[in-house]
Amino acid sequence: MSISTPNQIQTLESASTSLWGDAWRRFRRDRMAILGIVIISIIIVFIIFGPLFYTIPIDDIDFSKSTLPPSWEHLFGTNDLGQDQLARVLAGGRISLTVGVAAMLVSIFLGTLIGAISGFYGGIVDSLLMRLTDLFLALPQLPLLLLVVYLFRDAVRAIAGPELGIFVLVVLVIGGLNWMSVARLVRANFLKIREMEFVTAAKSLGARPARLIWIHILPNVLSVTIVAATLAVGNAIITESTLSFLGLGFPPDVPTWGRMLYDAQNYITTAPHMALFPGLAIFLTVLSINYIGDGLRDALDPKTRS
């Protein structure tokens, strides 16, 4: 059995660096992906630092300023309670993006764990886990999501409070119902990589299954999970907005983008700005994230390398 020399190890490291560098160069050439990064960066900067400079309270009620159109005093206008829309959009962005990222982490963790175990061990384990995946895929997601939130929201509120409780419930439910596609992608890559020579060599050297999964195989599936993660954030934001729009999300005093759309539905004709700005925020955020995900998929796909 041959032993890798320092020169061979350096060559492998250089090849890995070259692959990531090549992926970055191809990603840079994707104008829509770069545009997505610019847009999402601007949105993140505004929702993080905007409230530090735009200090109008989000919960002050003034019926004399109800449904005012955009002006220099209120750049995004006011809602039916006279509350400043820009301040609420900035505050709601923090909540919506946090829910999106947290739900993405849950779905990526579950999908990667189930896909890795299924693809590595195969046999009866693979069959059972894939049948479980098929079962979750067959469930109607939105009705099930609404049912779970409706049944458990009061119990979770009593345990963790009205805001934290709903946040945890929404994140767990959204993440727990969106891991299936990640699991299938990870499983397919594990089935392919586990038969390669470097995995066989690691087995012959006595590597345990846990080390084979997390050290040798999983890093080679990283590109798939990165792409899935970016797309999962956009899906989670849309799902949270749907829940809030249907009145089953956060409490009315928590200004998520979806909740703002829900509050604006009765004022579409008289005060369209109430729906325009939170809807535009959701649209731009999800669109830019999807552009980034598409760019990463093309850049990291070995089939697209010249």
Image: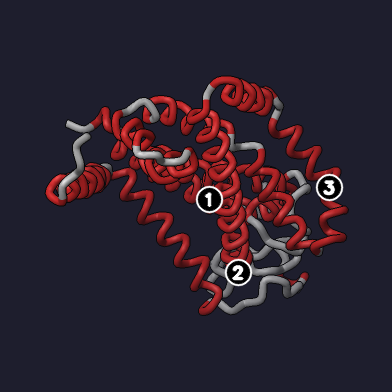
Q: Within 10 Å of the Cα at label 2, are there few (<14), some (14-19), or many (20+) other Cα atoms?
A: many
- Report the front residue among 35 and 64: 35
Residue at the spot x=64%, y=23% of the render? 128
Question: Would you name the residue on which mark 1 appears?
Answer: 280
Measuring from the top left, give residue 273's x and y in whole percent: 60, 55
Disc 2 residue type (three-letter) = Ala
Give residue 180's quadrant in the image: top right
Which residue matches tag 2? Answer: 87
Q: Quadrant of residue 74?
A: bottom right
Question: Who is closer to the viewer here, 25 or 41?
Answer: 25
38 and 192: which one is in front? 192
* Residue matched to label 3: 152
Upstream in sequence: badge 2 or badge 3: 2
**Which percent across, then down, holds residue 266?**
75, 48
Q: Is residue 145 or residue 261 the one in the foreground?
A: 145
Rendering coords of residue 22 (x, y %): 20, 44
Q: Secondary structure at mark 2?
A: helix
